[in-house]
Amino acid sequence: MATPSNLPVEAVVLADVAVVLAVSVLMVQLAKRLGQPPVVAEILAGLMLGPSLLGLLPGDLPARLFPADARTPLSAIAQLGLALFLFSTGWELDLRRLRGSGRTLGAVAVSSMAVPFAVGGGIAALLYRSQAPRGVSSTVFVLFLATAFSITAFPVLARLIRDRGLSRTRIGSMAMACAAGCDVAAWCVLVLVTAMATAKGTDGFVTTVALTLVYAAVMVFAVRPLLRRVLRGGSVRWDSTTQLVLIAAGALLSSYVTSWIGVHAFFGAFAFGLVMPRRHADTTGLEQRIAAPLDKAAALLLPVFFVITGLSVNVTVLGRSGLLVLLLALAAAVAGKFAGTALPARLGGMGWRDASLLGTLMNTRGLTEIVVLGIGNQLGIIGPELFTVMVLIALITTAMAGPLLRLMGVGGPDAPEEPLPVPRPRRAREQEPLDAQPV
């Protein structure tokens, strides 16, 4: 439905954003009462404002509320919020968590990615003929779905662990380290899949991969030292506002570069977060000056992303075959991630309760999987029905974590596990400049 001629599209977009934020706030308050994380409420709000619920009422309300000419600006707002979120996610993923934590953690980290990846690949092979869009190769389809099955949402998991009082426990530390490894591996595979899906022929694929490697080298050896100087000051003392603006601009420019290379723009924001300097000790200064404002900006804009996603999801048209695919994929996703995490943990000497707790935590997919699915949907790797199925799986596996943890007696700050041993810090001369000097 076209926007009325006497009402500028900008006004419609502003009204749409206001509606999205209001509905999201109401859903988040309801979710808190039910013990669910805010991301579950925001996903549900996006689905409610789309054809899955609002579309059931007479008058084609989703099209009236979100007319076609307003969706492009809304999509741009959503992409901005998502880029900032992925930058924060990359910054929060400290790969030092994977160092010096023992053989058990290494085995669990590898298995928690490899087993669901293999299970997802098997499911994708079964669904290829019926669910893959025309022109999508079996290799791209299988690799993409396998990656989606292996995702653990690091940001959602971090907040879930903190809310359940597991931040200082062995289980919580292991889950965070495993999730960090899974997410980095998944994004690396997605870069390859995206390059395969967008490249035109073998030459195009080789060029995209080569440019991606050059981009990665520039980020590590040029951008990261530059970021150290910006954050530390050096000869030029940047105030906190200037630092914040420069970091945000850098994340968005990095997104543009990866999009130009031929991989998705979101990879650039995530990679920029990964190369952000970190300090071993007190990070309060950086968190207050940069991380917290960007997190708030992302939180303000992300509900728009969920609505844009919800407009592409229509649960009512799944039908019997779609429900069967949902049940099959959900069972495979939960079983693959749980078995890939809990069994090696048990074999490594952990008790069944703790191993099961770790498997339950790692099954949290949340927003990260929806972001991945959105990339596949935009690139035409998966069709509308499978996109709907996988979004529902992300919602269900995230929503079920809270009740399962309560059933296992995990609900407060007094958790029984001992903290995971922390590796001995490096000597001061071996640490990054930011580690030794105040920012």
Image (spheres, helix red, strand yellow):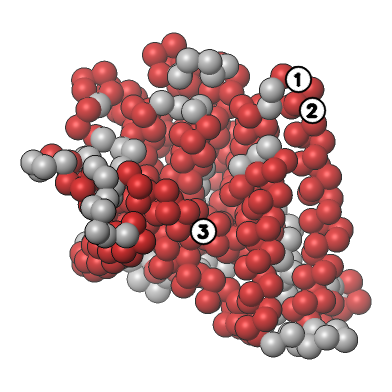
Find out whether the residues at labels 2 and 3 contact each other: C-beta distance under 8 Å. Answer: no
Q: Position of residue 223 (x, y in %)?
A: 80, 62
- Specify the label residue 206 is tagged with: 2
Camera sees residue 105: no
Q: Earlier in the sequence, mark 1 or mark 3?
A: 3
Residue on which the image places disc 1: 202
Q: Are marks 1 and 2 in contact (CB under 8 Å)?
A: yes
The Cα atoms of the two marked residues, 2 and 3, are separated by 29 Å
| Quadrant occupied by the N terminus | top left
Amino acid type of the residue that numbered disc 2 sits on in the rendered structure: Val
Residue at the farthest right position: 429
Sequence-earlier tag: 2 or 3: 3
Give the residue drawn at x 60%, y 60%: 87
Side of 232 relative to 76 (left or right):
right
For mark 3, what is the residue?
80
Q: Relative to 38, does residue 355 appear above or below in the rendering?
A: above
Near-viewer residue (203 or 373): 203
Gap between marks 1 and 2 measured at Cα: 6 Å
